[in-house]
Image (cartoon, rainbow, N blue to C red):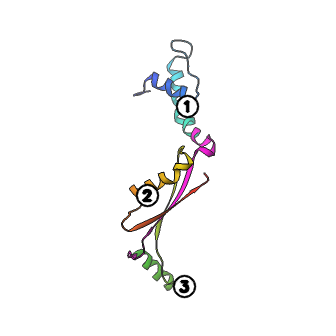
Amino acid sequence: MAGVSRSAVTLAAGLHGVPTPAPGGAGASSAGEGALIHYFLTAAPVRRFLRPKEIWMKARVHVFLKDGVLDPQGKAVASALKTLGFEEVDSVRQGKFFDIETGPLPAREAEERVKEYCKKLLANPIIENFRVEIVEP
C-alpha cells in the first residue's frame, strides 16, 4: 500500500461499489486493505468492459494524402503489383487507419470530438484529408 493512503483506497472503493471495512473494526487490518488493493489491480479494470455498450463510442478514421501530393509509397506498391503480374493496376495511394474507442461521449458530440483528434494529431491538414465514421461499439 506504499504511496496510497487508506482514505484514498476507501474512497475509490466506495465509488466502485466495493464494501470497505469499518475503521478500527473487524477487518480494518492490512489484510482488508490488501483485499481492496487486489480488487483494484484485478477486477476494477475489467469493470470498464462490463458497462452498457450505449455509453461507449467507437470511431474509424481514414487519413489519406490529398490529390496532388506525391505518394512514393503508393508508387512503390503499384510498381510491385505490376512486377507480380497485376498489369491492370494504374496507381495506388496509401493512407492510415485508426480505430478509436472512447469512454462516455454524448452521441451528438462524438463525430465533432473525433474530428478534433484528427485536426490536432492524427492528420496533417496541409497534405492530408480524413474521413470519420462513428460505428457501434
Closer to the camera in the image, 17 or 118 = 118
Of marks 2 and 3, which one's residue comes earlier in the chain? 3
Closer to the camera in the image, 84 or 106 = 106
Furthest residue to the left?
126
- Let me know if residue 35 appears in the view: no
The location of residue 21, given as percent across then percent down, is: 55, 18
The residue type indicated by label 3 comes to Phe
Q: Mark 2 points at which residue?
A: 118
Judging from the image, what secondary structure is the residue with disc 2 in? helix
Rounded to the nearest whole Å, what is the CA distance between mark 2 and mark 3? 34 Å
Cβ–Cβ under 8 Å for marks 3 and 1: no
Closer to the camera in the image, 114 or 7 = 114
Q: Residue at x 46, y 83 (%)?
A: 79
21 up-or-down from 42: above or below = above
Cβ–Cβ under 8 Å for marks 1 and 2: no
91 up-or-down from 63: above or below = below
Instruction: Look at the image and give the residue range highlighted in magenta.
Output: 47-71
Q: Mark 1 points at which residue?
A: 39
The mark closer to the camera, 2 or 3, is 2
| Mark 2 surroundings: few (<14), some (14-19) or many (≥20) residues within 10 A | many
